[in-house]
Image (cartoon, rainbow, N blue to C red):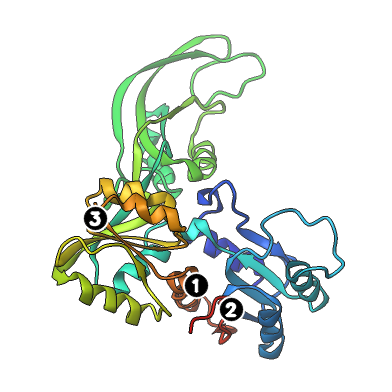
Amino acid sequence: MVRIKDVTQYLEGLAPLALQESYDNAGLIVGNPNHKVTGILVCLDSVEATIDEAIEQGANLIVAHHPIVFRGLKRFNGADYVQRTVIKAIKNDIAIYAIHTNLDNVPNGVNSIIAKKLGVENIRVLNPQKEGLTKLVTFCPIDKSQKVMDALFEAGAGNIGDYSHCSFSSEGRGTFKAGEDAHPYVGKIGEVHKERESKIEVIVPNHLQGNVVSALLKSHPYEEVAYDLQALKNTNPFVGGGAIGELPKEVSTEIFLQRIKDTMKAGSVRYTKILKPTIKRIAICGGSGSFMLSEAKKAGADLFLTSDFKYHEFFDSENQIVIADIGHYESEQYTSALLGDFLTQKFSTFAIRISAINTNPVNYL
């Protein structure tokens, strides 16, 4: 039997909640995590219409990209669409889970799928997360060092880019004296003991710190485990917002803008002055991305694809980059299919359906 918490834990393994932005509200918004899953409906927006769709489909879990609740609700009297959606979900025992900016901030997330749809290759993070890494340093008897390292690696430590099991070890001599109530692994109570030990150093993403420390304590033979957690200034190049990459070869700027319109099914593309006849390097930020324009410029992008630019913000291109704004819904529309693929690969005992409802509140003539 698959419970709601099994699904949410799987999704949080792909996009940890700790990676969401401070203003966000990703996670289980409505529902009991211990309830059995009868079906999943995947959508961009969980609104009243998608609750009705879930009821029709026999699904009791909605996985949405956008959280229906961003701020605290003080009343539940149906005064707005947010309250009505939550009330309807609770009445019909339907859980709502949101996977939002945490999915924006991981590889193979929202921005990656846009890039792939447009033929962009060599995809990297546009704005890597800063100060998101910690160095764990610990000490253990030499004959147990491999067991401890294996546990740390299994918990997610020691990954640097495409390399795993990264660590540094050195040998030294540790000393300690066990007190009367201690149960030492080596040495005798009341005597100073000297032990040949390995010093182990590994990199740990901050969002996995709890898991890694827990694995250390469980695998280590000592009753009291000595370890240090050192915050690093390094950026994590594989976690963060936006994406940047290159087209296989230079393409006419006008042709690429038309490709954007067709591929992203955009009602229109708002763009700034075309600066040169061809482009190659493309920056992308699904959803509202004007705040990432400076990063796109620094990265040397020829064009920055995103949405929700305000009139005066278009001037910020400063004739250095082409801004292409396609609309918020349009930039994130493939997220549902992405989530559907993730879930289908993992769960096969119940139906997983993509919402057929277009929840875009914006229309075009």
Nearer the observer, 3 or 134: 134
Residue under the image location 55 percent in, 76 percent down: 362
Residue 175 appearing in the image: yes
Residue under the image location 37 percent in, 59 percent down: 107
> How far apart are the alpha carbons under marks 3 and 2?
31 Å
Query: What residue would you read off at disc 2?
Result: 359
Residues at marks 2 and 1 touching, judged by CB atoms closer than 8 Å: yes
- Regarding mark 1 in the picture, which secondary structure is present there? helix
Nearer the observer, 252 or 153: 252
Nearer the observer, 114 or 347: 114
- Residue 300 coordinates in the image, percent (x, y): 22, 51
Query: What residue would you read off at disc 3?
Result: 301
- Residue 240 coordinates in the image, percent (x, y): 40, 50
Three-letter residue code for mark 3: Ala
Residue under the image location 65 percent in, 14 percent down: 180
User: Eyeballing the image, is 245 above or below 202?
Assistant: below
Identify the mark at residue 329; answer none if there is no mark: 1
How many circles with numbers are drawn on the protein? 3
Outermost residue to the left? 249
Can you tell which quarter of the image residue 46 is in?
Answer: bottom right
Q: Is residue 98 left or right of residue 346?
A: right
Residue under the image location 50 percent in, 74 percent down: 343
- Regarding mark 2 in the picture, which secondary structure is present there? loop
The first of marks 1 and 3 along the sequence is 3
Outermost residue to the bottom? 56
- Residue 94 coordinates in the image, percent (x, y): 73, 75
Three-letter residue code for mark 2: Thr
User: Eyeballing the image, is 200 above or below 350?
Assistant: above
Which quadrant, please, contains the N terminus?
A: bottom right
Three-letter residue code for mark 1: Tyr
Residue 142 appearing in the image: no
